[in-house]
Amino acid sequence: MQAIIKTDDIGFLTQWSPEAEEIFGFGKGEVEGWYLGIFIHSIENMTNEKRKGMGPEHILEEVVENKRTISFSTINIRGDLKAFFNTIEIRPDKEGTVATITKGEDTEDIIRYNEMIDEHSDKALVVTSRTGRIFGINGKFALKAKFNRMRLLNRPLGLVEDAERYDLQEIFGSLDGYLLAWPVE
């Protein structure tokens, strides 16, 4: 499956296709007007160099300012916290950028990670980076936090003493970050 999304020249979404909604699990109304880096997070275990190359600031500099097409493959996280392998090609457009996202075959680690998400679906869940930046939350966590999930993405997570903590890199060598789970009260 392929999806097309567009951004303006500073990285805010201007087009979100039905295919993008299906691949990423975020509705058009949820992402309209949002900055690209807010909801597209790689949980791939990668070098700092590759992570910097996938950063929105680097992408915008290469594509918008330098008029270059760039492409890379990575493991992103959906709105429902499930992971998926994809290849992204981003090219210049008269208004900013056009990205073609091609969903690929899931690896064994991705399949096992997605099963883990299903196993813990009765709990309030958060997926974070190693530094505690929120990559995704489920609806149960949004209710617990009393916040719209889109307002929590990309923000630092506060105290987590009472959470079960799973190190994704330790469990799945190709993934990175943490899955935090709280029992629903």
Image: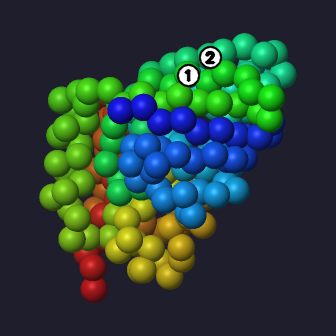
Residue 95: image quadrant is top right
Residue at (33% x, 42% y) in the render: 83
Q: Residue at x 54, y 57 (%)?
A: 28
Type of amino acid at the residue the image marks with label 1: Glu
Give 17 or 50, whichever is nearer the viewer: 17
> In the rendered view of the protein, which quadrant contains the N terminus?
top left
**Horizontal side of residue 142 vs 169, given as left or right:** right
Q: Foreground: 102 or 153?
A: 102
In this image, 149 relative to 116: left or right?
right
Q: Residue 5, labelled with which disc?
A: none
Picture residue at 49% right of the left edge, 59% below the top: 27
Q: In the figure, 147 relative to 112: above or below?
A: below
Classify 10 Å Cα crowding around label 1: few (below 14), some (14-19), many (20 and above).
some
Judging by the rendered image, the residue that carries numbered circle 1 is 89
Tell me which amino acid carries mark 2.
Ile
Q: Is residue 25 visible to the viewer in this orientation of the structure?
A: yes
Quadrant of the image for the C terminus?
bottom left
Counting from the top left corner in percent of width and height, residue 14 is at: 69, 47
> Mark 2: which secondary structure?
strand
Q: Secondary structure at mark 1?
A: strand
The residue that appears at 51% across and 19% down in the rendered structure is: 72
Relative image position of residue 43 (x, y in whole percent) = 42, 37
Up-down: is 83 above or below 151? above
First reached walking from the N terminus: tag 2 or tag 1:
2
Q: CA distance from mark 2 to mark 1?
A: 6 Å
Q: Are marks 2 and 1 in contact (CB under 8 Å)?
A: yes
